[in-house]
Structure formats: structure tokens, C-alpha cells
Amino acid sequence: MKPIVILLMGSPADSEHSTAIESALHGFGVETAFRIASAHRTPEHALAVLAEYEGSGRPRVYITVAGRSNALSGFTDPQVSAPVIACPPPGPEVDLWSSLRMPPGVASAVVLEPVNAALFAAKILSAHDPAVAEAVRAFQAAQRRRVLDADLDRQGGPAGV
């Protein structure tokens, strides 16, 4: 079965940040599902959404995107057997501590940059899909090349050529 990343947003206000994550995931060839469920306002719906994906048998990672007080990540993690990555959108109202400080037994990771959250999820799923693993390696090679090219450009091109 093909792996999937479930992008779980706390509200429609989180769509822009989630779309950036989705775009990066598609660059790795990872299928995504967008869902909206609030730990505060619709906990029953959130549980039903999680049960749907937990029962699928597919390799999966959850990325939670919730602004302000991020209860969604802490709510999601103990309900699922797959990794949970919190990627809260930036903003003055975001309580970053609500993503970082979890009680014992709640182990969601926190990655602030959308591309890095997607990369982390792709690395996890690469164990289940060789094409995703190859896409991760290609991304890393392109990142290295970008730095080396910038250094060469800064130095005026390759020395001795």
C-alpha cells in the first residue's frame, strides 16, 4: 500500500500553511489527505477522522497544523500508532509551548518550517516506499548542489578553470 500523510488542520484558517506542506510532500511523491478537525470544538469528529486512517492499514504520518493553542497535536498523538508531526503556522498568537510541552506518553515532534515538516514525513515514509526514499535523496543532493553553486558563484566561478 502506498504511504499517505494526513494533514490535520484545526480550522480553515490553517489552510495556507497546510498547502505549503502539501506542495512539498507532492514534490517527494507522497500522497496527502486534507482534513479539518478541532481538538477544542469537534473532538468527536477528530476521533472519527483518526479512526478512519488508523483502520486503513496504510503506512502513514500525521501532520497537525493548528494555530494559537495547539491542543490538536497532543490530542492526536495518543490516539494513533503512527508518528505525529506538529507544524504550527507562524503568527503573533501562536503559543509554541503548547506544541513543545507534552505530558509523558505523548510524543509528537515539532517542526516549524513547512518544507522541513514534509521532509521529515517523507523520510519516515521512505522505509515503506523506495520511490519516496529516492525523492528524499534527490532533494538532499539538490540542496547540497545549491550551497556549492552559491559558494562557486561568490568566489567568481571555479578556480583554475
Image (tube, rainbow, N blue to C red):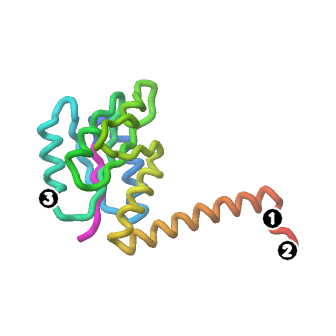
Pointer 2: what residue? 161
Numbered disc 2: secondary structure: loop
Gap in angstroms between the C-alphas marked 3 and 1: 55 Å
Three-letter amino acid code of the residue under disc 3:
Gly
What residue is at 39 percent from the left and 43 percent from the top? 87
Of 159 and 51, nearer the camera is 51
Disc 1 crowd rating (10 Å Cα; few below 14, some 14-19, many 20+) is few
Q: Position of residue 21 (x, y in %)?
A: 40, 50
Disc 2 crowd rating (10 Å Cα; few below 14, some 14-19, many 20+) is few
Numbered disc 1: secondary structure: loop
Q: Position of residue 113 (x, y in %)?
A: 47, 45
What residue is at 33 percent from the left and 33 percent from the top? 70
Q: Is 55 located above or below residue 1 in the figure?
A: above
Q: Is residue 144 found left or right of 95 in the rendered image? A: right
Disc 3 crowd rating (10 Å Cα; few below 14, some 14-19, many 20+) is few
Point out the stretch of residues depicted in magenta: 1-8
Pointer 3: what residue? 55
Pointer 1: what residue? 157
Q: Closer to the observer: label 3 or label 1?
A: 3
> Do the residues under discs 1 and 2 have CB atoms within 8 angstroms?
yes
What residue is at 44 percent from the left and 57 percent from the top? 119
Q: Position of residue 130 (x, y in %)?
A: 38, 75
